Amino acid sequence: MERDMRAILCNAFEGIAALNLADIAEPHPAANEVLIDVHAASVSYMDYLMTCGGYQMRPALPYVPGTDAAGVVVACGDQVTRFRPGDRVCCGNWFGGFAERMVASESSTALLPPNVDFAAGSTLQQAYLTAWYALIERARLQAGETVLVTGAAGGIGLACVQVANLRGARVIAAVSSAAKAAIVRAHGAEEVIDHSREDVRERIKTLTSSEGVDVCVDNVGGPLFTTLARLMRWNGRLMPIGFTSGEVPSLAMNLPLLKNYSVVGIFVGAWKERFPHDAARAAETIMAWVAEGRLRPHIDRVLPLAQAPEAMSAVASRTAQGRIVLQVR
């Protein structure tokens, strides 16, 4: 029997103005999926970009935004072996999280540690798996290397700061305002650069004795990326993840040639689809680190589901620190 549920719907690729709270039919899990009673869902820049039609993929309209959630398993597809009804989990999908129920593949779902609540759990999948994939899988980050993270106070940025710090790297955090300096320092940044008022090139040259950075994780793009491309160390890894500035930059290829550095793309969603077992194992390690207190997700604020447009507006204007969470149940 069909059941209705509350959900945030995106009715057109027109951003926040196209969102509304509605009653829709609940989804059904495929053979390799679990159905989850969503208790909390976090809001990311990717969610916002998708509602604007600016993301790499466009769901069929209308659709329910929301990549990351946490809750309780209520049903499992026939091929699911790792979960059963009643399990507390965090989960990820391309969309569907801003609703009372969502489906997620078995490989994109992880058991939530008993000492981690649903609000914190809803912030883990996208942000920390992206940090893992960027720094551990792709950059092969080594202890003692210098890592620069841009957009460092956002959800993914803060996760990268924490994971780099946990791996023994020296972390430089680039933020867009002085108000964001305290949070990145509290999560492991040794140095902070406010690129809204400081000369990034000169600060990095000073902080690295003109050697440059070993790894740069860039969430911003635009002119900042162009500057960073001239500040890489020999054998460095320049890693574009996103473009919150709104501008996708170009790169003069003589720059990586002269410094022998690599440009390493990071698209965690594609990695999860192509290598689901690797992603699932990484998620299990991340859950253990969170349970042990070695990783500390930061929640900017918790809002009711109906206030998803307000949450997305804060993310779009880059005023949120860490993740904003929607309380669904």
Image (cartoon, rainbow, N blue to C red):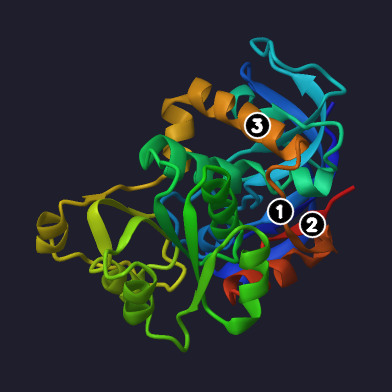
Q: From this viewpoint, which residue is outermost toward the front?
A: 209
> Quarter of the image holding residue 288?
top right
Q: Residue at x 70, y 15 (%)?
A: 82
Crowding at mark 3 (Cα within 10 Å: few <14, some 14-19, many 20+) = many
Question: Disc 2 or 3, which lies upstream in sequence?
Answer: 3
Tag 2: amino acid? Leu
- Rounded to the nearest angstrom, the CA distance separating label 2 from label 3 is 18 Å
Q: From this viewpoint, which residue is outermost toward the bottom?
A: 197
> Quarter of the image holding residue 242?
bottom left
Work out whether 223 lies above or below 145: below
Question: Disc 1 or 2, which lies upstream in sequence?
Answer: 1
Q: Which residue is mark 1?
A: 42
Q: Quadrant of the N terminus?
A: top right
Work out whether 98 lies above or below 78: below
Q: Are marks 1 and 2 in contact (CB under 8 Å)?
A: yes
Q: Residue at x 65, y 50 (%)?
A: 66
Q: Position of residue 246 (x, y in %)?
A: 41, 72
Q: Position of residue 107 (x, y in %)?
A: 59, 24
Q: Which mark is residue 219?
A: none
Tag 3: amino acid? Ala
Q: Which residue is mark 2?
A: 326
